[in-house]
Amino acid sequence: MNLPDVLRRHRLLAVVRADDPDAALECVLVLAEAGISLIEVSVTSKDAAGVLVRARAALGPEAPLGAGAVLTEADVVQAEQAGASFVVTPGVVPAVAEAVRLGLPALVGALTPTEVVAASLSGAAAVKLFPASLGGPAYLSALREPFPEVPFVPVGGVDTGTAPNYLAAGAVAVGVSGPLLGDAPRGGDLDGLRLRATAFLAAVA
């Protein structure tokens, strides 16, 4: 899997976190039905591995399904066994080296120039700019001057208003959780989730 190409093609990464495994799976399936097929399930979710297994079975072998908030080597092994096709980390953590060893693409968190360098040298397939809201699109634009070849994915505080600005500033995709998922991970309104999914897809089109 060429993660930068997948990110460029989809432009929107949905991040699902939930304490209810059934609600998490429902969110994944609703997102996919709405047209958002690039989805990350955070390992901080309850029974995240089980959610990934069930989501993979429902979405098929080719769907770009990731495991997020991955920290350790064991997290990576479990994510791969559950069917994840990529992993997302909050920074340069032990999970990155294990993902590289297993050939699993890693979207690695960074904020400062030093962290971007560390992420790139660690083998990151792309860099998650987090929390993106601290600097906004202008900060991303400034970062891309010394790092024009790094595929950046801003995450944290991205909404339908700012998503186009991040893409215009050079992001290959944006990652969104709360502003997209709303209360759906807590068993809330799935119709609202469908509407927000449509709005986000329009924002990144």
Image (cartoon, rainbow, N blue to C red):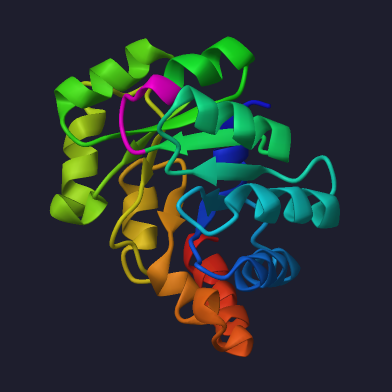
**Residue span colored magenta:** 90-95
Q: Is residue 158 visible?
A: yes
Quadrant location, the C terminus: bottom right
For residue 91: magenta?
yes
Quadrant location, the N terminus: top right
Is 58 on the left-hand or right-hand side of 167?
A: right
Instruction: State the image coordinates of residue 61 (x, y, percent, origin top left).
Output: 83, 41
Q: Residue at x 33, y 62 (%)?
A: 158
Along the viewing direction, whichever of 64 and 147 lies nearer the viewer? 64
Q: Is residue 124 visible?
A: no
Q: Residue at x 17, y 25 (%)?
A: 113
Q: Quadrant of residue 140?
A: top left
Along the viewing direction, whichever of 79 and 201 lies nearer the viewer? 79
- Number of numbered labels in the structure image: 0
For residue 196: magenta?
no
Is 15 on the left-hand or right-hand side of 92?
A: right
Instruction: State the image coordinates of residue 156 (x, y, percent, origin top left).
Output: 30, 56
Along the viewing direction, whichever of 125 and 26 lies nearer the viewer? 26
Along the viewing direction, whichever of 142 and 122 lies nearer the viewer? 122
Is 163 on the left-hand or right-hand side of 199?
A: left
Q: Residue at x 58, y 83 (%)?
A: 195
Residue 60 position (above or below residue 184): above
Is 13 on the left-hand or right-hand side of 90?
A: right
Instruction: State the image coordinates of residue 160 (x, y, percent, origin top left).
Output: 40, 71
Instruction: State the image coordinates of residue 201 (x, y, percent, origin top left).
Output: 56, 66
Classified by dominant secondary structure, the portion drawn in magenta counts as: loop
Residue 7 position (above or below residue 22): above
